[in-house]
Image (spheres, rainbow, N blue to C red):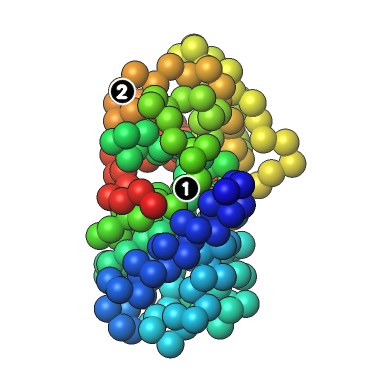
Amino acid sequence: MNQNEQKQAVAQAAADYVAKNLPRGAVLGVGSGSTVHFFIDALAPLRAHLGGAVASSEAARHWLEAIGVPVVDLNHVDRLAIYVDGADEIDPQLRMIKGGGGALTREKIVAAASDVFVCIADDSKRVERLGRFPLPIEVIPMAARQITCQLAALGGEPHLREGFVTDNGNLILDVCNLTIDDPVAMESALNQIPGVVTCGLFALRPADMLV
Ligand code: 5RP
């Protein structure tokens, strides 16, 4: 199976999981990225089952609307039973690096509001240890230079993602060569830097299932 066939297969398996486990009429959390795009295609036959979806990016919102699933504001929902999203890397404890598509902040917000996080990923995303994929960090534009210096002091090599603005109007620094010995501690420490909106480590709230 090539990578796209794997993405399609895991997307279909996640849609089957949703059909079995999401109560009829409930709102589903939906992530971002190419694997999620396949998942949204696989959701089309479930339109009548869903009470709507919370989208973690503007791209996902458009894809959901295109198949006729109403997009719901997270402020109109207490909790989500299930959230389905992809990953750039996932380790054996189901901790992840996310944000290759730049949607990490909204993804983290929706993940935190969800009871079950189902990660859908092809084989290339599985790692023993996080950190080969450059770590995306969303930053407030005025703080980009200061944060770049602090990340370099931590041993990373931050690169501004050229020509990219997040759905929240911020910038992304992609950080190479960070040694991530303790993903939970690193996530907490990076998120404390003034001007960091959030980092792409999903260790404090890892996935619950990997498809
Ligand atoms: C976007 C993400 C995506 O889930 C991640 O980049 C994986 O994308 P793809 O399914 O295209 O490989 O975190 O911010």
Hey, what amino acid is under mark 2?
A: Asp
Residue at disc 1, CB closer than 8 Å to ligand 1: yes
Eye-nearest disc, 1 or 2: 1
- Across and down, in percent, residue 105 comes to 46, 48
Residues packed near mark 1 inside 10 Å, few (<14), some (14 to 19) or many (20 plus): many
Q: Circle 2 sits in a helix, a strand or a loop, which is it?
A: loop
Task: Looking at the picture, tell me which residue is in the foreground, 184 or 207.
Answer: 207
Residue drawn 57% across the image and 41% down it: 100
- Distance from the alpha carbon under mark 1 to that under mark 2: 22 Å
Q: Quadrant of residue 75?
A: bottom left
Residue drawn 32% across the image and 40% down it: 94
| Whether residue 179 can be seen here | yes
| Whether residue 169 can be seen here | no
166 vs 49: above or below = above
Q: Quadrant of residue 179?
A: top left
Residue position for label 2: 182
Sequence order check, earlier mark of 1 and 2: 1
Residue at disc 2, CB closer than 8 Å to ligand 1: no
124 vs 101: above or below = above
Residue drawn 31% across the image and 83% down it: 24
- Across and down, in percent, residue 135 comes to 51, 31
78 vs 133: above or below = below
Residue at the limit of the structure toward the right, as seen here: 163
Hey, what amino acid is under mark 1?
A: Ala
Residue position for label 1: 121
Task: Looking at the picture, tell me which residue is in the foreground, 129 or 12.
Answer: 12
Q: Circle 1 sits in a helix, a strand or a loop, which is it?
A: loop
- Across and down, in percent, residue 61 comes to 56, 68
Residue drawn 27% across the image and 78% down it: 23
Q: Quadrant of residue 81?
A: bottom left
Q: Is residue 123 left or right of residue 75?
A: right
